[in-house]
């Protein structure tokens, strides 16, 4: 299974943000697409973050196990 990253966002101006009591309005178009980080394997100790490559410092993209299920047409 393969997927490309970077085609959807949870932040980057897709939600309103309050900074020093002032609301910075969002642009809902920035929330479009899908970001597959939510489908990646979580760190078994931290529980709330993906696995991290301790050498490179980025997310571990090749260690997520998946189960493919056939969806009836």
Image (spheres, rainbow, N blue to C red):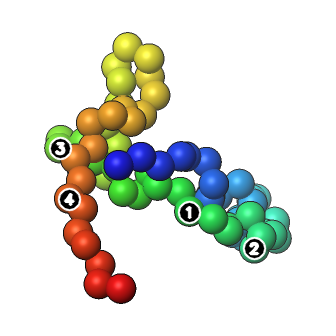
Disc 4 versus disc 3: nearer the observer: 4
For marks 1 and 4, the one nearer the N-term is 1
Residue hosting label 1:
34
Q: CA distance from mark 1 to mark 4?
A: 19 Å
Indicate the position of residue 34 as horizontal and vertical percent values: 56, 62
Vertical placement of 51 versus 25: above or below? above
Badge 2 or badge 4: first in the primary sequence: 2
Residue depicted at x 61% and y 48%: 6
Q: In the rendered structure, which disc, 1 or 2, sits on the residue that comes first in sequence?
A: 2
Query: Which quadrant holds the C terminus?
Result: bottom left
Q: Earlier in the sequence, mark 4 or mark 3?
A: 3
Residue 30 rendering spot, x and y as whole percentages = 74, 64
For marks 1 and 4, give the one nearer the viewer: 4
Crowd tier of the residue under label 3, counting other residues whose Cα lies within 10 Å: few below 14, some 14–19, many 20 or above: few
Question: Of marks 3 and 1, which one's residue comes earlier in the chain?
Answer: 1
On the image, the x and y values in percent for residue 51 come to 31, 37
- Give residue 67's mark: 4
Q: Quadrant of residue 61?
A: top left
Q: According to the image, label 3 marks what residue?
A: 44
Outermost residue, top direction?
A: 55
Label 2 SS: helix
């Amino acid at each position: 299974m393969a997927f490309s990253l970077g085609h959807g966002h949870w932040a980057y101006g897709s939600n309103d943000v309050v900074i020093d009591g002032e609301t910075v309005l969002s642009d809902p178009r920035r929330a479009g697409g899908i970001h597959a980080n939510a489908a990646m394997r979580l760190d078994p100790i931290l529980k709330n973050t993906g696995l991290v490559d301790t050498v490179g410092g980025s997310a571990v993209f090749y260690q997520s196990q998946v189960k493919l299920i056939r969806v009836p047409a």
